[in-house]
Image: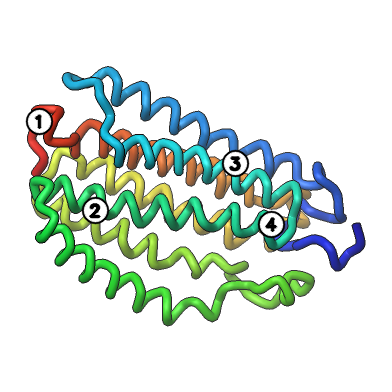
Amino acid sequence: MTSLDFIDLYCERTAAGFWNEPVNAISNLGFVLVAIVAWRVAKRRCDPSADLLELVLFVLAALIGVGSFLFHTLANSRAELADVIPIWSFVGLYVFTVIYRSTGQNILKTSRIAVIALIITGSVFWFTSGEVITNQQASDHSADRFNGSLQYLPALVALAGFGFIAVLRRHPARVMIVGAAVTFTLSLVMRSVDLIACDATGIGTHFLWHLLNALMVGILLIALVKEYPPASAGKRTA
């Protein structure tokens, strides 16, 4: 494998090789663990059955870890897709699921709110998409002072808006949602300073992005399972 055959975006990678980013790769186990924990929590509620939306979210949470593991080991464009697709699939489905259950599982209300949310987050992505590092820029670590982290700003905006609404409505999930937003903000900082901290740490801080994101995903899944249960669970869905 030559220098042109792998993507080098993070401090820990110094050369080609499957295990050249061991800490970044192994830290993705956190996503698999939180998916299992959330599934077990869902089994313990009054109605232990997880509906299809929950099950898909649990699988996507685990796949985030699998995809990121592949990217930090194989470090090629195909693995990059395996890394990105589960992340944005999880974000989109989670937002839809929360809206759907918050409206009493009314598909028409859900559709209207989802369109508004899509327009807002899409607009944010449009204005920040230029910050995403491309493969061609990967060899130049100075190409982006945020190391491509602004591509995740739409997700942060959606999460912050979700938390704001939950606080205004004094929803039981408000503490967890705000906690998830704070955790995600900190994880974005860790992703952004990975290269800056490289000399001091030797391995950077990208692995903390994985661990904090896994924590954030776990918080969101627990909030969904406990405070936004499906109608069949016989609990309040507002």
Q: Which residue, given by chain and number where applicable, does mark 2 sit on?
A: 163
Cα separation between marks 2 and 4: 30 Å
The mark that comes first in sequence, 2 or 1, is: 2
Q: Count neighbours of disc 1 (C-alpha within 10 A) and say few if under 14, some if 14 to 19, many if 20 or more.
A: some
Q: Which residue, given by chain and number where applicable, does mark 3 sit on?
A: 66
Q: Which residue, given by chain and number where applicable, does mark 4 sit on?
A: 197
Give the percent coordinates (x, y) of residue 21.
76, 46
Q: Which residue, given by chain and number where applicable, does mark 1 sit on?
A: 235
Amino acid beneath label 4? Ala
Total numbered labels placed on residues in the image: 4
Give the percent coordinates (x, y) of residue 231.
12, 35
Q: Count neighbours of disc 3 (C-alpha within 10 A) and say few if under 14, some if 14 to 19, many if 20 or more.
A: many
The mark that comes first in sequence, 2 or 4, is: 2
Cα separation between marks 2 and 3: 28 Å
Residues at badges 2 and 1 in contact (C-beta under 8 Å)?
no
| Position above or below: 205 against 146 | above
Mark 2 or 1, closer to the camera: 1
Which element type, helix, strand or loop, lies under badge 3? helix
The mark that comes first in sequence, 1 or 3, is: 3
12 displayed left or right of 29: right
| Position above or below: 78 against 27 | below
Nearest to the observer: residue 64 or residue 161: 64
Give the percent coordinates (x, y) of residue 120.
28, 73
| Residue at image coords 56%, 42% | 65
Give the percent coordinates (x, y) of residue 142.
71, 75
| Residue at image coords 52%, 45% | 64
